[in-house]
Amino acid sequence: MAHYLVTGGCGFIGSHLADRLIADGHRVTILDDLSTGRLENKPTLARLVVGDIADQQAVREAMEGVDGVFHLAAIASVPRSREFWAETHRTNLSGTITVFEAARAARNGAPVPVVYASSAAVYGDNTATPLREDAATRPLSAYGADKLGCELHARVAWEIHGVPTVGFRFFNVYGPRQDPASPYSGVISIFARKVSRGEEVTIYGDGQQVRDFVFVGDVVRFLVRAMERRPQGAAQGADVFNLCTGRPTSLLMLLDVLQELCGSRVRRVHLPPRPGDIRVSIGDPARLRAGFDDVCRVGLLQGLGATLTGE
Ligand code: NAD
Ligand code: UD1
């Protein structure tokens, strides 16, 4: 049994991870400021520290004595990073550096490993399809720039401070518990709720933008695996992997499938594309497969079914 800190553990992905760690018999401490996370998401057996990820003392205290850190706390919305540039930077980059710094001496003065969330947003307007990890990073948003900054600081964490890390460039993650009520939330959670209620959906742009949607259960499996065993072929103590399926889905296709599953047709309103929005984002999962001897297993139909029933 190990003791892990999950930052952002009351959020969408973090709470699924915390559930899994507890089911595996581990001790879990969560650090979350409950800004987008919810108390109801916290597993009963997890200890919750309510605090800010950029607060050095709060992070140090929450990390005291743990065996490893899953760092997921962030402001996950691209449009919010446009509206609140400096505020999101503080959480998304300064917060991550605060985590790496505390990880230098978390267990009896020795470093502990950190598995953290980067993002496909680091590729920005690179139009390569599919995107391999060695594709040029050209973030278009403050959010993507900060996630790239996390990867650069992860390298410093390892090279200078001996903190081993694994970063995952999550593509578009979806599943139960992703907040359907916030306009800043992921498109699947928003569309799933609207279509199931027969309500009108808003499409930014022509709806032909393409995403690589990954089910949250697959994400959790890779996070846990990266903590337990260093991936094969990881040349250094700071490595980064795409977490993706390699399968493209346009927004219009997504809407069709949801309508089919719900047996309803809804009105669609088109608004201009969001500034900084990425047109095509498809990852190449080859390195993920080689490093972990595993792939994302849940297809879109199955994953959308689980999202709609909340299971
Ligand atoms: P989420 O908003 O559900 O979870 C983020 C959690 O972090 C929330 O519980 C929130 O309360 C907490 N948090 C935010 N600011 C904080 C702060 N200053 N101090 C402490 N806690 C804070 O989002 P999510 O989708 O679960 O995202 C988890 C991670 O995965 C984030 O790092 C996000 O950038 C990354 N990511 C998500 C996706 C996706 O498609 N959902 C894709 C790529 C990367
Ligand atoms: C998402 C994640 C981001 C992650 C990135 C990785 C969220 C909130 N965002 O960003 O954290 O780093 O994937 O690839 O989880 N759209 C509509 N109508 C809506 C909502 C969205 O048309 O009501 C469109 C958007 O303009 C965009 C697409 O759907 O073109 C996807 O949007 P969104 O789910 O917000 O995700 P990303 O911006 O790709």
Image (cartoon, grey):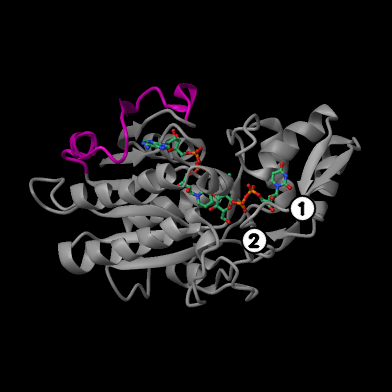
The front one of 63 and 87 is 87
Query: Between 53 and 296, which is closer to the camera in this rendering?
Result: 53
Question: Mark 2 or mark 1, which is nearer the start of the sequence?
Answer: 1
The image shows residue 104 at horizontal and vertical percentages of 16, 53
Q: Is mark 1 within 8 Å of ligand 2?
A: yes
Q: Would you call the spot at circle 2 few (<14 residues within 10 Å), some (14-19), or many (20 or more)?
A: many
**Percent position (x, y) of residue 311?**
63, 33
SS assignment at label 2: loop
For label 1, count other residues whose C-alpha is less than 10 Å away and answer few (under 14), some (14-19) or many (20+).
many
Report the Cα–Cα distance between label 1 and label 2: 12 Å
Residue designated by label 1: 251
Quick check: 45 left or right of 210?
left
Three-letter amino acid code at disc 2?
Answer: Ile
- Tell me if residue 62 is in the magenta stretch: yes
69 up-or-down from 308: above or below: below
Q: Is residue 184 magenta?
A: no
Q: Which residues are magenta?
A: 37-66
Looking at the image, which residue is at 77% across and 32% down? Answer: 194
Q: Amino acid at mark 1?
A: Leu
| Place of residue 69 in the rendered image (x, y in percent of width and height, measured from the top left) | 29, 46
Residue 145 lies left or right of residue 25; in this view the side is: right
Does the beta carbon of the residue at mark 2 sit less than 8 Å from ligand 2?
A: yes
Viewport quadrant of the N terminus: top left
- Residue 226 x/y as whole percent: 37, 57
